[in-house]
Image (cartoon, rainbow, N blue to C red):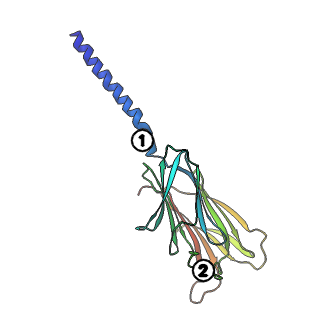
Amino acid sequence: MRKIKFVAFAVMASLVFSSCSSDEILLPEQQNQSKELFKTYQLKRDAEGAYSIDVNTEDNVSIGKVKNNSNNTNELHLALSFDKLAQKSNYGSDLWFNNENFQIEFISENYNKKPSISIFDDNIKFVQKGKKNKSKFLKDFSIAKNEDGSYDLDFKVKKKVSVDFVYDSKNNIYEIHLEKAKKSKTKKKYSRTFDKEEGRLLQIHFVNHTGESKGGSGVIRKPIIIIDDGEDG
C-alpha cells in the first residue's frame, strides 16, 4: 500500500515539474507575441523631395523589405536573429511610391499589430524638372517616433514664409498653414511634439496657401502624414 502511494506521489510530482518546465520554455515566445521589435524610427524628406527612413531595433533583429503589390505598401519584416546585427537600418532610394501615395508597414514576428506611416506627396520621379515644389513653401521635414509613443516633427521653410499651427478638432487633423509673408522671416526651423491617442490616427497636414485659385481653392495639402499604431479594430 505504501509502495502504491509513493508511486502516485512520484507521478504527481513529475507532472507538476513537467508543467513548470513547459511554462518556462514557452515564456519567451509568449513575450515576443506582445512586443514590437523596433524601438523608434525617423522618416525624412530632403530638399529635393526624396524620402528615407531610419529604423532603430531591439538587439539582434533582422529586417527584410518587401514591396506588397496587392496593397501598394513597403513592408518591413522584423524577426529575431542569432546573428549580431546593427540596431540601426536605413532605407532610401528603393522605397516605393504608388502615384502620390507612400506607405511603410512594420511587421514584427509573433506580433499581431502592424504599425504604419503613410505619406501623400509629390513623387519626384514623375515631377518635371523646374516645377518641383514651385508652389510650396516647405523645404524639408522629418517625423520621428519616440520610445514613449510620442512623435517629433521637425521642418524647415523657405524664405519669406509664415507658419501657423491649427488643430481641426472635428476631423482630428493637425494643420500647419504655410503662406508667403510680406517681410522676410528670421525663423525658418520649427519643431512640434505630438501625442497620439490610442485607437486614433495621428494626422498632420501641411496646408500651402498658394494664392493661385484658377477655379480651385488656391490651397494645396501636401505633404500629408498619417500614422497608425495598428490598434486592433
Tags 1 and 2 in contact by the CB under 8 Å rule?
no
User: Which mark, by number, is residue 219?
Assistant: 2
Residue 1 appears left or right of 121: left
Could you tell me which residue is drawn at 68 percent across and 77 percent down? 179
Count residues near mark 1 (Cα–Cα under 10 Å), then give few for <14, some for 14-19, many for 20+.
few
Quadrant location of the N terminus in the rendered image: top left
User: Considering the numbered disc 2 on the image, is that residue within a helix, a strand or a loop?
Assistant: strand
From the top left corner, tell me how far across and down residue 30 is, in percent: 42, 41
In the depicted structure, whether residue 114 falls above or below residue 161: above
Q: Amino acid at mark 2?
A: Val
Instruction: Answer with the quarter of the image where residue 216 lies.
Output: bottom right
Count residues near mark 2 (Cα–Cα under 10 Å), then give few for <14, some for 14-19, many for 20+.
some
Q: Amino acid at mark 1?
A: Gln
User: Which mark, by number, is residue 204?
Assistant: none
Could you tell me which residue is drawn at 28 percent across and 18 percent down? 9
Question: Is there any visible trace of residue 149 in the rendered image?
Answer: no
Q: Earlier in the sequence, mark 1 or mark 2?
A: 1
The residue nearer to you, when weighing 113 against 64, is: 64
Could you tell me how far apart the alpha carbons at marks 1 and 2 are, in whole angstroms? 50 Å
Residue under pointer 1: 30
In the depicted structure, whether residue 132 falls above or below residue 44: below
Instruction: Single out the residue that lies furthest toward the front.
Output: 83
Could you tell me which residue is drawn at 77 percent across and 72 percent down? 185
Instruction: Answer with the quarter of the image where residue 159 lies.
Output: bottom right
